[in-house]
Amino acid sequence: MNAIVYDSGALIAAEKNDRPFVAQHETFLSARVRPLVPAGVLAQVWNARPSSAVLHRVLRGCEVLALTEDRAKAAAELCHRAGSRDVVDASIVLAAIEHLDAPILTDDLGDIGELVEVSGHTRIKVARP
């Protein structure tokens, strides 16, 4: 595994200074696993307050993926096929696909799992942070 995709649940765990998640994140970095954060996920959880220092530290170790025109169109298409309207969730699944079926850390196992299934990339592992 060379990458892992974080959904908002993972970043919320960071903001709450969830020690098991922070330790898991540090383990990923030590193993040279790149944590990926789609830009829409960052927009959902960003908090500039100093009380979010752990979130800021975790994000420094992540690569934020831009929502390009091509990714936006692909997310809309995946949503259409799944009967979903959550383009951020779709962008998470697409990030995993783009990075060799990277695993996804999310609290939204149902919606993300359904999008993974519809995508046809059923090897993608979906787990809680």
Image: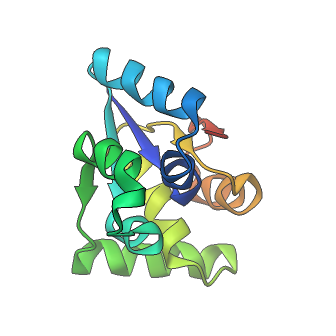
Compare residues 50 and 46 and report the one nearer the observer. Answer: 50
- The x and y percentages for residue 87 are 50, 77
**Residue that protrudes farthest toward the front in the picture:** 50
Is residue 49 in view? yes
The quadrant in which residue 57 appears is top left
Would residue 32 appear left or right of 41 to someone viewing this image? left
Determine the residue positioned at 56% across, 43% down: 105
Residue 72: horizontal and vertical position, in percent? 35, 79
For the point 39% across and 69% down, which residue is it?
A: 47
Comparing 24 with 19, the one in front is 19
Residue 1 in view: no
Q: Which residue lies furthest to the right in this view?
A: 110
Location of the N terminus by quadrant is top left
- What residue appears at the point 26 percent right and 56 percent down from the top-left corner? 64
**Which residue is at 67% across, 40% downward?**
128
Counting from the top left corner in percent of width and height, residue 78 is at 53, 72
Q: How is the image coloured?
A: rainbow
Quadrant where the C terminus is found in the figure: top right
In the drawing, does residue 32 fall left or right of residue 37? Answer: left
Considering depth in this image, is 14 or 91 the residue closer to the camera? 14
User: Is 65 drawn above or below residue 75 in the view shown?
Assistant: above
